[in-house]
Image (spheres, grey):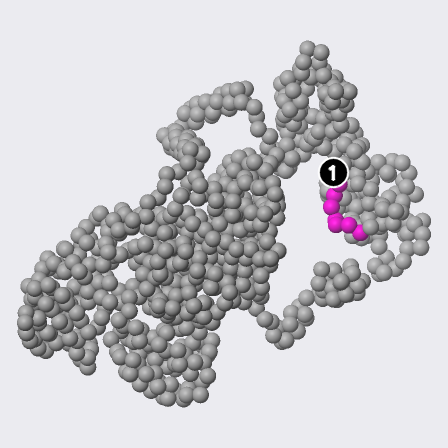
Amino acid sequence: MGSSEELVWWSEMMVEVGGGDSMVVLRCCICTSVSFLALELELYAMENTSRNTEVHSNSDACSNTVFDHHRIDENFDVDFRELGKDWIPECAEGLKPYIDQRFSDLDKAFIFYKEYGRSSGFDVRRSTERSDKDGNTIEKYFVCSRSGRPDDKNVDGKLQKRRRTVSTKCECHADLVLASHQLGGFYVKKFTESHNHPFAGKGGMQFLRCSRSLTEFHRTFIFDASKSNIGASRAYTIFKSMIGSYEDVGATVVDFKNFARDIKQHIGKHDADMIVQKFRDIQESSDSSFRFEYRTDSGNHLTQLFWADGEGRKNYEVFGDAVSFDATYRTNKYGMVFIPLVGIDNHWKSVTFGAILLEREDNENYIWACESFKKVFGKDPKCIITDQDLAMKAALQISFPLVKHRLCMWHIMKKFPSKLGTVFCAESGFMDKLGRVIWADHITPDEFEQGWLDAVDEFDLNENVWLKEMFDMRSLWIPAYFNDEPMVGLMRTTSRSESSNFYFGNYVQRGDTLSEFYICYQSAIEKQRNNAKKLTHYDDFTPKTITDREIEKDAIRLYTRDLFYKVQEEIRAGCMDIILLGMTCLDNVKKIKIQEPGKRTRIFEVELNMETHFIECSCKLFTRVGYLCSHAFFCLGICGIRTIPRQYVSNRWLKNAVERFSTLELGEISDRDATILSRRVQTQDCWFEFQGCLSDASGNADVLEYIKNGLSSMGKHITTTMKKPRTRLNSEQIEELIDSRVVNEITIQNPNKSNNKGSRKRIISGAEKSIGCNKRKMRKCATCQEYAYHDSRTCPEKT
C-alpha cells in the first residue's frame, strides 16, 4: 500500500465524502508519518476481496467505504482536533528572533535562526534572496524546512511508481527575512513565528538537520576507524559507546555512511594520479629513501605499482636473505593483486619490506615486478619462497636465475584435505606417517623418498595424480632437499604465509580505492613496526636462565629475547642425555660422534677446531637458521669453550640489528610535514590534558561544573576570535585527511577492473543454483517486463 495511484484514489474519495474539511485532514495526515500509516490501514480496510479487482469509478469505491475517525484515533492516538491549527515554538527568550535585530553577516544570522529552530524542534534552510545591480545581497530569506509544496509525482499526466518515501513539505509559512542595513550588516525585516505543523518531540530532536553536523572530530574518528577496516556503521556504534547515548552523538549512522561515501566520490577518477602524486610527495618531503615504480598501458591506465619506504629498505638490507612473495586478493576495488614482500626480523616475527600491486597474474607482470624489486632494493635475496603460481616461477627463473626458489610448505600442506578428503586425512593416520618424513630435519633425500613411497603404498594411493605431482616437485618444498640452504625458518613456518594474508586482510577491503588502500596498508605497517619497537624495548630485560653455563649468559648478551629462547632450548638440549659415542683428535681438530636419546638410529658428527673454534655439525642447523644446534653446544661444553664463537653469531639475530648493520640513511622530514606533525602532537597533548582533568575530577560535581564552565568560556572566546568554519564537507578537508591532493589534469587513468583468480566469485554448481532459485522470489524486471529471477541490471535482453 501507499503507492501514488492509491494515494490519489484516496484523495479523490475524501473530496466526495467530506469536502474541504476532509482535504485538510488529508493534508495533515500526509505531513506526519504516523498519520500516513493510518491512511495505509484505512486503504487496506476499504479494499475488496481481491487486489486485482479493477475499480471502474471512484464513486463506486467510496459507496462501500466507511471512514471511521474513532478507529484511527484508537489505534494511533492521533487527535484530529489538533490538525490544521497553528503551532508557536516555545524556547528561551534570548534564542527567539525579533524585528530590527542586527547581525554582522548572513552566516551569523543563519546560525542564530538555526539554533532557534533546534531548540524549538524544527529545521531551517536558506531560501531565496534579492541582490542589487552590483550583486550585493539586499534581502535574504530563511525558512522552515517544511515550507513549499510536496513533490508532484505526476509526470506528463501519468502516475509514476517511485520509492516509498515521505515528503516533509507542507506549505509552512514560518520564515525569517533579513534586509541589508545602511550602516552595514543586516537586520530582521520580517519574522513569521507560527507553523502549520507540530514540532519534533524529545525523542525526535536528534534527527533534525540542525541537530546533526559532522564536526572535525566526527570526520577524523570515521577516517581513523576506516584505517583499521572499521566501517561507518561500526564506527557509529563505537562512537555512541564513547559518548554515552545516541542522542549525544550529534549525527546519524547515515551521516557517517555519507561521509565515507563522499571520500570515495572525491577520489573518483583521480585515484591513480593521487596515489602516484602522493608517492612523489613522500619522496620529496618526508622520506627521501622512499622508492616506487609504476607502469601504464597504451590507454594510460595504471597496471603495475611497486613501492618500498626507507624503513622497509633498511630492514631488507639486514633481513633480506630470504623473501616471501605471497599474493593476496580482494584488497581493492580494481581487483589488482596485492603482493607483500615479507621476511623474518631479528625477533622471529614477520617484517614487510615493500609491496606490489599487479593488474594480472601473468608472466609479463611478474617479470616487471622482479625487475622493479632489483631496482629498488639493489641486491638479490639468497632465497625466494612463493606459492605454486607457474607465471611467478617462470618470471623468477628469468629475473633471478642464481637465486634459489622454493615453495611455501603451508600452501601445499593445506591442500591435502581437499585433495584426499577431510575425514581420510583426519582419521586414517596417513598424514601422521607422511608428516614424519615431510617435517624431518635430519633425513637425507633418499630416506624421504623411501618414507613417502612406503606411506603412499600402505594406503593404496599410488594412482593419486595430485600426490604424484607433489612428489615430482619434491625438491622445491621438502626440507630434506635444502638442509644446507639458509632459510631462516621462513619456509617451514606454517603460519607465516597464513598470517601475512590474514594480517593485511584485517586492514583492507575489496571496495577500497588505491588511496584508501595505501592508508590502510600504512596503518598495518605502523602496527607491525610498533610491535617490533616493543620487542626491542623488552630486549633490555634479562631473561631467566635455566642452566649454570656461562655460554647461556653469553647468549643473553648477544641475541634478542625471542631468539635467545630458541638458542636456550638448544643449550638446554645440549646439557641433557646426549650420548657420546666417540671422539678423535687430529691436528688440533676434534671429531666427535654423538647420539640423541630419541634418535638412536641416527648418529651426528661434529668437527671442532680448538684453535679457530670452527665447528660444523652434520645436522646443518646453523646453515638453515643461523644459530648453533644442541650438538654443537654439547661439544663446546665438553671441550671447555665458555662463549659462543663469534663467527657463528649471525648479525640478523642480534639486538638492534637494523641500527647496527644497516648503511642506509633516512632523510629528514620537510618543514610542511614537521608542521603537520607538530599540530598532531599539540592535538594529542590537548586531548590528554582534558582526559587528565576529567580523571582528576573523579566524579566530583563541583569540579566537573568548573570544567564545563571553563570549556564553555573557551568556546565563546574561540568563536569570537576565529571565523567559525562551515560544517559542510569540502575538498580541502578530505585532502587533508587522506594527505593527498587532487591534480587538475589527469595524467594517469585509474586501473581497469581485473578479474584475477582470487578476486572472482566461487563457481556455483548446478545443484546449488537450483536450490538457490527455489529460495528466491521472482520479481518483475523493469526492462523485459516479465517476472523472473533477474532484474533490470542483469536482464539478458539489456543491450
Residue under the image location 31 percent in, 76 percent down: 481
Q: Dot 1, crowdedness within 10 Å: few (<14), some or many (≥20)? A: some
How many numbered markers are drawn? 1
Q: Position of residue 82 (x, y in %)?
A: 77, 33
Q: Up-down: is 344 above or below 739?
A: below
Q: Position of residue 111 (x, y in %)?
A: 63, 25
Along the line of sight, the residue nearer the viewer: 122 or 198? 122
Query: Is 277 a magenta residue?
Result: no
Residue under the image location 52 percent in, 47 percent down: 275
Taking the view exactly as shown, the residue that stands out farthest to the top is 183
Q: Quadrant of residue 316?
A: bottom left
Q: Is residue 483 visible?
A: yes
User: Is 287 left, or right, of 363 in this rendering?
Assistant: left
Q: Up-down: is 585 above or below 36?
A: below
Residue under the image location 82 percent in, 40 percent down: 26
Q: Up-down: is 553 above or below 710?
A: below
Quadrant where the C terminus is found in the figure: bottom right
Along the line of sight, the residue nearer the viewer: 67 or 695? 695
Q: Main secondary structure of the magenta part?
A: loop
Q: Is residue 565 visible?
A: no
Q: Where are the magenta residues, as a range?
A: 161-168
Q: Position of residue 209 (x, y in %)?
A: 65, 35
- Looking at the rendered structure, the kind of residue marked 1 is Thr
Q: Position of residue 337 (x, y in %)?
A: 51, 60
Along the line of sight, the residue nearer the viewer: 402 or 329? 402
Task: Find disc 1 in the rendering and name its residue.
Answer: 168
Residue under the image location 68 percent in, 10 percent down: 183
